[in-house]
Structures are given as structure tokens and as C-alpha cells.
Image (cartoon, grey):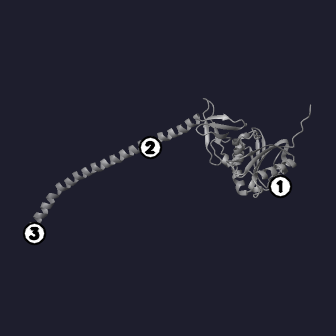
Amino acid sequence: FLAFGSSHVAFLKYFLAVPPQVSAMGKGGKGKGDFKGGKGKGKDGKGKKGKDKGKKGGKGKAKGKGGKGKAGSKVIIEPHRHEGAFVSKGKDDSLVTRNLVPGESVYGEKRLVAEAAEGEEKIEYRVWNPFRSKLGAGIVGGIGQCPVKPGAKVLYLGGASGTTVSHVSDMIGPEGVVYAVEFSHRCGRDLTNMAKRRPNVVPIVEDARQPQRYRMLIGMVDVIFADVAQPDQARIVTYNASYFLKNDGWIMISIKANCVDSTAAPEAVFASEIDKLKKDGVKPKEQLTLEPYHRDHALVVGVYRPSKKKKE
């Protein structure tokens, strides 16, 4: 023990020196703890700030929603001269229809909510894009007569995915019915899914050249709208009219010049198609170009088998 006295003394000195160091470390630890606590506070602070920002963000969202509401109140909806269609007056005027299924878009179109008086329900409208619809382009282009109106029974040939059919559904309202014929099964599936939510749409996935195949599904209609883009579309329309269109009923046909004859001038194609319609009992009332919305297209409106006016 004596031999190792010096080392033991050193050892004891070390041990004696340790407690203050430990206490110092402890203090330091506390200090660190305080510092960490500071960080923690800092995080909390950030968290609070984050929350505050979140709240602000929430306010922002609320403002955004409020903004929409305000936009809805600022947008003035006026009835169009054609029944069932409306015009939204605002920053950009646009053609709209009253949404039969509020809260749902069909093809990603904008929806506008008009502010109603207290106690009344808000009315929702869907913006009708004329670039995606021949009928919409015709109405925006200033067509004189539009027989698609509330309560009408419409046979729509060439329904595609139901873009225009959905707006026709809005226009005719719950009292009317639109029979939409589409040959493509791919588009017919979209059309059928759209019709599930709209009770006034009857989707028919069938060939419009053979109306006898779906004659048991359709009653007599007031209007036939055709957008089939086929070389023999005039014959297709009048053949369907002979089955389903009442006398003095209306025909609206969208003629795509390129589909009938891509070599002839569009004006010549339109004239020859109108002649074909005349031979089959249609009295044309007006022809309207769909430019600039659809190139080389024309919308022809006519009366089928018009009754002769009695001379007084």
C-alpha cells in the first residue's frame, strides 16, 4: 500500500476532484437542459407560429371560399332569349345552364353559384363551353330558334361522352327527356355513367343507322339533334325522324364538311346536304356557321313535315 502510496494519493485526488466535476457537469447538464428547453420553446414557438400561419392559411381559405361566394354574388345570371339557357354577366360573360345535379361537374366545367334571397336555396349553374359543344356554339353564335327548351323530348344522335347531352338535360329540366344514341362503347360507358345521376337522360349504345333496334325505347319526340359526323348523316337523321319525330317537329343537324366531302368547298357541301334534307321532308329554317368555335361546321335548323297553312 505504501509502495503504491503516491498512485493512491493521485487516485484519491482524482476521486475527490470528481464530485465537483460531476456537479459541474450536472449544472452544465442543467444548462444544456435549459438550452434544449430553449430549443423546445423555440420549436413550440415555431409550432405556434406554424399554427398561427395555419390559422392564417385557414383564414385565407375562408377568404378564398368567401371570394367564390362573393364572385357568385357579383356574377349576375340573366335568362337567355332561348328558354333553358342563361348568361352569366361578370368579368367574362359566358353561356350557362342551371345544374340539374348541384355540386357535380360532368366534364370538369366551371360551376357558378348565384346568391339567392334569404331563406331560398342557392341555384347552381354550369358554364357551357362552345368549343366543346356544337349546340352551345350555335346558341352563342346567335341561332334564331332553339327548340331544345324546358319540357321538350329530344332525340340526340351522336351523344359521345355526354358533354352536350348534360347541358341539354339541364335545359329541358325534369319534365323533359333526352334519348342519347351513341355507337362507340367507350363513349357509351361515360354517357351511361353521366345518365346515372340524371333521371331525364336515356342512354342508348346503338347504331343510329338502324333505328329499328331501339324503337321500343323511344316514344315520339319534339326535336332531333344530330352530331354524327358521317358522310350519310342527312339520311341517318331523316330515317330516325321517320320513326320518332312528330309532324311539325324540329331537326337540328350539325354538318361537318370534311366528313361529307373533304375535296369540295364547305359551302357546296352544306348546300348539297340541305338539298338532301329538303327531299326527305325537312323545311330548312336557317343555317348558321359555327366558326370560330368549330372549323368548317354549320348548324342547320329545319321543320320536319310542316303542316300546310290553311288559306283564310
State the mark number for residue 210. Answer: 1
Q: Among all residues in the image, which is located at the extreme top?
A: 118
Q: Position of residue 303 (x, y in %)?
A: 83, 42
Q: CA distance from mark 1 to mark 3?
A: 117 Å
Closer to us: 30 or 172: 172
**Which residue is disc 2 drawn over?**
54
Of the two numbered discs 3 and 2 in the rendering, the one whose residue sits closer to the viewer:
2
Badge 3 marks a residue whose secondary structure is loop
Q: Cα distance, mark 3 to mark 2?
A: 70 Å
Residue 265 drawn above or below residue 75: below
Q: Amino acid at mark 1?
A: Gln
SS for callout 2 = helix
Frontmost residue, 277 versus 59: 277
Q: Position of residue 59 (x, y in %)?
A: 47, 39
Q: Nearer the viewer, residue 32 or 308?
A: 308
Quadrant where the image shows the N terminus: bottom left
